[in-house]
Image: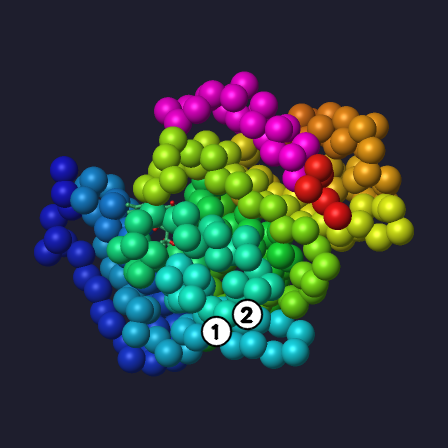
Amino acid sequence: MRGYVPTYSIISPAKLAEALDMLAQDNGAWKPFAGGTDLMVLLEAGRLPHKNYVNIWNLKELRGIEVTDNQITLGGLTTYTEVQNHPVLQQEFPMLCQAAKETGGIAIQNRGTLGGNIVNASPAADSPPALLAYDAELELVSKAGARRIPYSGFHSGYKQMDIRPEELLRAINLPRRTKGLTHYYRKVGTRKAQAISKVCFAAVAGVKDGEIDHVRIVLGSVAPIPLRCFKTEKVLHGQPLNGQTIAAAKQSLVDEISPIDDIRSTKDYRLQVSLNLLEDFLSHLR
Ligand SMILES: Cc1cc2nc3c(=O)[nH]c(=O)nc-3n(C[C@H](O)[C@H](O)[C@H](O)COP(=O)(O)OP(=O)(O)OC[C@H]3O[C@@H](n4cnc5c(N)ncnc54)[C@H](O)[C@@H]3O)c2cc1C
């Protein structure tokens, strides 16, 4: 049953400093509200947990995509539509554009944000695998100042992450080091649009002097968090691309992921699809 709207408060500060003041008050009583695409579902289901929200949608400090020589900085409020339309992202970060294209429908793409997708912390979310494979770094900001952390260390358990109640995810930084790499992204779901992933796979790698190089593999929906597969990457790094290497990587992936049976799929299906995608990715390496 829908939550009773008059029991909730929402304020709309015009400036980042005002928003951070609110978030710092009353021991985490106020929560950020960005596009609202996850939060409104909870409201409709009568499961919206907190009562007080800070609408951050109007904060210019969390908007925009900035390109420098070494990195691209995406404001936390960057929408999926903005991702898809950006020429440098299309050229250098195609997996992120593909994830954005396959997220929800057009209305969700216009309103849902990358920051909301990351902090909502669903293991089945579609942009985290691409962001993790691109070695993203997060910029968090609070009244006390800003801090930067590797995205790969952000999610620590189901819906657990390295963000404090008084912090906002201000931006996501992507290092521009994707030249020459093979990019491979697959969202496996019941249908193309409006489906939550059964398995999501994002990976990049290069081959240098016959050896696998710069390999980063990430899976969604097969663990309590979007999972960067460091152990399997290690098995592949510096190895020649042959049947033995592929077999060793597949064995490592079996040990590294922990898929479950749930309403969307089964453990066995998820495991088999993950192994098939790993093999297909490796067969695409050049
Ligand atoms: C019909 C439908 C289809 C969907 N399809 C997909 C899909 O295919 N793939 C997918 O991955 N997701 C999907 N989603 C989920 C959702 O759209 C995304 O997770 C979206 O990116 C959330 O962003 P938002 O700005 O709307 O977040 P909100 O709902 O505003 O917030 C989500 C959470 O993040 C926090 N938060 C938001 N922004 C910040 C910030 N900058 N700093 C700190 N905390 C913040 C909020 O407090 C809240 O806890 C779908 C949702 C719907 C309703």
Magenta-colored segment: predominant secondary structure: helix
**Amino acid type at image mark 1:** Ile
Q: How is the rendered protein coloured?
A: rainbow
Residues packed near mark 1 inside 10 Å, few (<14), some (14 to 19) or many (20 plus): many
Q: Please provide percent x and percent y for residue 263.
A: 37, 24
Q: Please provide percent x and percent y for residue 38.
A: 31, 49
Q: Residue at x 47, y 69 (%)?
A: 86
Look at mark 1 in the image and give the residue it sits on: 65
Badges 1 and 2: C-beta atoms under 8 Å apart? yes
Helix, strand or loop at label 1? It is strand
Foreground residue among 211 and 266: 211
> Left of 262 or right of it: where is 152?
right
Foreground residue among 3 and 27: 3
Q: Please provide percent x and percent y for residue 232.
A: 73, 37
| Magenta-highlighted residues | 258-281
97 in relation to 121, above or below: below
Look at mark 2 in the image and give the residue it sits on: 88
Residue 128 in view of the camera: yes
**Amino acid type at image mark 2:** Val
Does residue 47 belong to the magenta stretch? no
